Amino acid sequence: MARAHDDNWDLASSVGVTATMVAAGRAMATKDPRGLINDPFAEPLVRAVGVDLFTKLMDGEIDFDAIENASPVRMQAMSDGMAVRTKYFDDYFVDATGAGVRQAVILASGLDSRAFRLPWPDGTVVYELDQPQVIEFKTTTLAGIGAEPTATRRTIAIDLRGDWPAALKAAGLDTTAPTAWLAEGLLIYLPPEAQDRLFDNITALSAPGSAIATEFVPGIIDFDASRVQDMAGVFREHGVDIDMASLVYTGERNHVVDYLRSKGWDVDGVTRTELFQRNDIEVPAPEHDDPLGEIIFISGRLAGHPG
């Protein structure tokens, strides 16, 4: 089903499925003996969602050789990609708080468990924003297994199409102090104008010294939906009737690095290939690469608002 301006979801439908899929990727990467990341909460969260496909992915019970255009090598490449992505943003938060930032905002937080697993300095407040049912599910599930946040965690149950800046300030965000912002795996699910508006709002809420991290997917501009048909086949074989290509917004949009720089942010990008190399992980062959192409991971700081 195509996206609509007022659509909504839980963790087993529409865009919510992608949050569960990403968490399953983190669970698989956590089991990898190379130990690039450690997310002990990803697996119990995915199991609680109850989508059979993702449980079988984590348990290694799917024979990818039996599915057209899929393969174990392709799935390993996807898991490795999730590992380097997760580590990049983990390190970003550690660096930001190491520089003195004491409030963090995770936009469209999904099944992100960083508020429970990162070594936040004393006094750090982590704000999580997502759909009400997503926030409630994660909070209840993690409480049920006895998980305790490692920072002060404040949840804001709101769709990002609503007035989330007002809700964030009402929850206690101090706009006179630096903030570390994260928009991970979010932008392709926003129309181009909403992407710009998101960064406009972030900039307006940010004091000098704030940090930002996100990614840009150049391949979304001329996205070829046929390249994700193998994943759609995996989904259908295991009872998940969803067309991943229909969830994203394609077409021309501003390059994130250029747009953020125009707003006063000093940001740089690093390609996923560079992250693979930086972490001594084999770069996937082109035929096993992400159908969205070469993702650029972005982070930087705000020196001061433009005049």
Image (spheres, grey):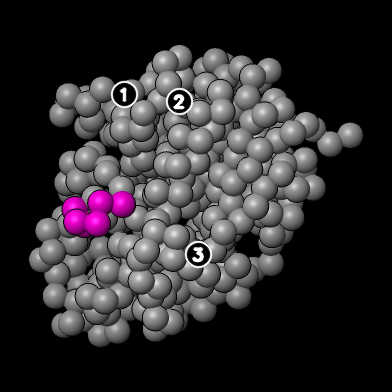
Identify residue for label 1: 149
Q: Residues within 10 Å of mark 1 (few under 14, many from 20)?
A: some
Query: Disc count in the image?
Result: 3
The disc, 1 or 3, on the residue closer to the chain's N-terminal end is 1
Quarter in which the C terminus is drawn: top right
Q: Is 209 displayed left or right of 95 in the figure?
A: right
Query: Looking at the picture, how far across and down is residue 30, in whole percent?
Result: 24, 50
Which residues lie in the magenta part? 31-36
Report which quarter residue 135 is drawn in: top left
Q: What element carries label 1?
A: loop
Q: How many angstroms separate mark 1 from mark 3 (CA)? A: 32 Å
Q: Is residue 104 visible?
A: no
Q: Which residue is drawn at 50% across and 28% down?
A: 97
Of residues 79 and 146, the one nearer the viewer is 79
Identify residue for label 2: 126
Query: Looking at the picture, how far across and down is residue 197, in whole percent?
Result: 69, 44
Q: Residue furthest right?
A: 307
Q: Residues within 10 Å of mark 3 (few under 14, many from 20)?
A: some
Query: Looking at the picture, how far across and down is residue 13, in whole percent?
Result: 33, 53
Amino acid type, callout 3: Glu
